[in-house]
Amino acid sequence: MKNTSIFVFILLLFGLLWYSSCSPHYIAANFDDRTIDHETVAILPVEVVFTGKVPEDISEEDILAIEEAEAKAFQISFYNEILRSTKSGRKPIYVDIQHYQQTLGRLEEQCTSLSDAWSKEPAELAAILDVDAVVKARIEKMRYMSDLESYGIDLGIQLAQLFSGATFWPWLPPGMTRAKTIRADYSLLDGEENKILWSVAFDIDADWSRPSNEIIDEVSRRAGRKFPYRR
């Protein structure tokens, strides 16, 4: 009887671990029918929300520059991940993904700031970008990122000094770089009905001793695994 109880406990433990590792994932039951005429999808700059303590020696302009840089970095990373997931005949996608430079360019032409893009209705954004659906994402994290050069983003000398200086993270004990959770939420929204067609949400623990691009790309890979429009 005792052995049976232990066996049941182990099964429950493995089940709990398996369940906690799974990402809440949604896709519309009639996804194929609702997207049969879709040709192009745009990935919007990602809304990045900082939940940690803001250093006293950083200006609002610097914070805005960091947030916009990170928004574009996450956008570029997810775009690259979707394309990467279709190489060598792996799970091809039957829609075009608008290039992120074209997306940013059209938003700028319409005088639409990144913060405006996060709050606008999907139908309005789809009309601006001339696409059938848009991907909106929100990232919550406790640390800013500095080394975004791999995405073609230069934060500038002043910000680089802030990141590298010891005063930028005075509240973190030495060596405390792991288990800083990033919360991610990605959604694909229809450009006509403003309804969610697909979404995925998850938490991921980041090792902040790693380069920023590795952390960002890890989030993108996790989100892109179940991206729809697959043949």
Image (spheres, rainbow, N blue to C red):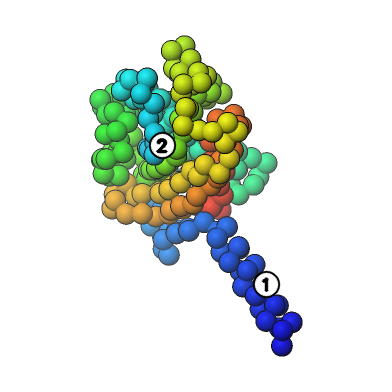
Q: What residue type is labelled 2?
A: Gly
SS of the residue at dot 2? loop
Q: Is residue 30 something that shows in the picture?
A: yes
Image vertical order of residue 211 relative to residue 5, above or below: above
Q: Position of residue 104 (x, y in %)?
A: 37, 27
- Circles 1, 2 touching at the beta carbon (< 8 Å): no
Where's the N terminus, which quadrant?
A: bottom right
**Residue drawn at 67 percent across, 81 percent down:** 5
Q: Name the residue under label 1.
A: 10
Q: Is residue 217 something that shows in the picture?
A: no
**Residue drawn at 26 percent across, 40 percent down:** 120
Q: Distance between the Cα atoms at labels 1 and 2?
A: 37 Å
Image vertical order of residue 142 relative to residue 22, above or below: above
What is the number of callouts on the image? 2
Image vertical order of residue 128 relative to residue 25, above or below: above
Q: Where is residue 204 in the image (x, y as percent from the top left)?
A: 53, 47
Q: How crowded is mark 2: few (under 14 residues within 10 Å), some or many (20 or more)?
A: few
Q: In this rendered view, identify the residue nearer to me: 227 or 222.
A: 222
Q: Position of residue 224 (x, y in %)?
A: 53, 46
Residue 13: quadrant of the picture = bottom right
Name the disc covering residue 52, or none: 2
**Residue drawn at 53 percent across, 23 percent down:** 147
Please tell me which of labels 1 and 2 falls first in the chain.
1
Q: How crowded is mark 1: few (under 14 residues within 10 Å), some or many (20 or more)?
A: few
Furthest residue toward right: 3
**Residue drawn at 42 percent across, 42 percent down:** 140
Name the disc covering residue 98, or none: none
SS of the residue at dot 1? helix
Furthest residue toward top: 157
Q: In this rendered view, identify the residue nearer to me: 147 or 57.
A: 57
Q: Which amino acid does label 1 sit on?
A: Ile
